[in-house]
Amino acid sequence: MGAKVTVTTIYVFRPVKLFCCVWTLFSVCDVQVLAQTAPATQIGSSTKVQFDRGKQLLEQRKFAEAAAQFKETLKSVPNSPLLYNLLGFCELQLSHVDDAVTYFKKALELKPDFKAARNNLGGIYLMQGRTQQAIGQFSAIIQTDPNDAQAYSNLARAELAQKNQEDALDHLRKAHDLSPQDVQIALALARLCLEMGRQDLGRPVAQGLSGAKTPDASKELEIGGLLLSYKLDEAAHVRFRNALQANPRFQDTLFALAKDLFEKQNYRAAVPLLEILNIKMQQSAAWHEMLGYSAFKLGDSAKAVVELQKAMDLDPRNENYILELSEVLVSSNNAAEAVTLLGTASKAFSHSSRIWFGLGTAYLANQQRALAELALKKSLDLDPSLDLAYVVLGQGYKEGGNWDRLSETAERLIQLNPENPDGYYYKALALQSGSGSKAEDEVKIEKLLRKSLELDSKNAEPHYELAKLLMRAGNKESSLLELQELVQTNPDFGPAYYHLARLYREKGDLDKSKEAQEVHERIRQKERDKVMKRMIVEIRQR
């Protein structure tokens, strides 16, 4: 009867994910060790039995029964902070938040340095949005134990709730320094660095996670996603394979992730992810489409054609697959094949404005301007709001030197979509080229070109036309600035370097003039090589 009772299990607040909206506030498995000693006169075998029974019920998640046992135990040990902490935990699990707060406060009244109760109370305050009070609780823990990594982590979460990223970053870094093997803290720190644009700080943390041991497949997925964000693709795909091996049901999750990467045009990361999926997934039309179009964007047109054809065979009613395959064919200098493909599709999808638009584009690429015009007008009959059709029509009129129709098309495009920069560019080009440039039109042309560039400053053609216009007007400094801006955003636009070389020479800057001339020659040679390669392709096909 005179023996002392030592209790070693304490249930504490521990957020599972620092940045997750839904997070587990308390875990029965997360424990700390604290010796709780009571006077011998207060302890009996029946008290110990009651306490052990309460512990057992708690671990079975029978919180109401556990609370009843702990209350009985309190009659023998009325000043036990441990029992009040456990009661608070049970009440919280029963959604009796006010009672839980009362019990945690009582535990702290009895033992102000009781980290478990203070952590739990801070967790409730954080859950309730009382972030300043939560910060007070977590800061108090750090004052008593400056090496408590979890307290720093929890403090960072509270600070983030107050949008105080800088302090949160400092405290997460401290938590990571104290506990570098804690995967959850490392994930939180690496994510925050991403949000703050501090990849320089976050990347080493993410690299450290590459070999971290994880408890389950879900965590493997989480780490894999983070590694992708840091462009650590190979390490990410190892994690994804681990997740899939541990839980094959993650096939759908990984397929959805691959689709998200594909839609964000991250084709290089999407392909390995698609390739680790099982055979069933790889037999779907969507899988072949994503793999094929990704291959095209990564420079493998032959593989793209094969995979997109498989997607079409599996789902012949999907217009996207037809349009994507036609894009691959046109880009590979096989416009005639694209015309054949889309011509057949226009019969099966006779009411599809997109298919007719695609056919018009293929005709134009194949130098069949009259047929292109008919197909594009058909697409506009089906969808009068399709501004892209006017863009391609304008391109055809520009190439054919049909300035009156280009002017008319430009007007319609501007009326349909005033935010489309091509309308203003076409109108300026038509006004400039239609019947000879007139002095009174120069101001209008410049305004139109500047409006086009205001809407899309990276478009090379309006920059080039504006530079030439300024040069003709004798404003060579402004012309030089336009050309310099042009080659920064479009370094392969050859004609700009020809005029840059000329302007630099006139300014007496012979080194820059020579450099611009050399770039111009390289680009011209590259264009010649492309033409020769296209001729070789054509002769093989005859």
Image: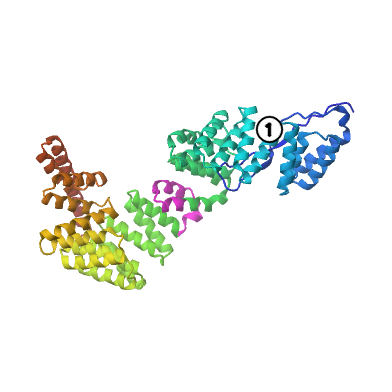
Q: Position of residue 222 (x, y in %)?
A: 53, 44
Q: On screen, 76 above or below 539?
A: above
Q: Which residues, given as a range, are shown in magenta?
A: 258-284
Which quarter of the image is occupied by the N terminus? top right
Q: Does residue 45 appear left or right of residue 190 in this picture?
A: right
Give the tally of numbered discs.
1
Say if the magenta span includes residue 266. yes
208 or 311: nearer the eye?
A: 208
Q: On screen, 380 above or below 109?
A: below
Amino acid type of the residue that numbered disc 1 sits on in the rendered structure: Lys
Q: Residue at x 66, y 43 (%)?
A: 124
Q: Position of residue 496 (x, y in %)?
A: 17, 47
60 or 459: nearer the eye?
A: 459
Q: How is the image coloured?
A: rainbow
Say if the magenta span includes residue 369. no
Which quarter of the image is occupied by the C terminus? bottom left
211 or 353: nearer the eye?
A: 353
Q: Does residue 399 appear left or right of residue 67 in this picture?
A: left
Q: Residue at x 13, y 47 (%)?
A: 475
Q: What SS does tag 1 mark?
A: helix
Q: Does residue 62 appear left or right of residue 267 in this picture?
A: right
Residue for badge 1: 115
Q: Position of residue 398 (x, y in %)?
A: 18, 62
Secondary structure predominantly adopted by residues drawn in magenta:
helix
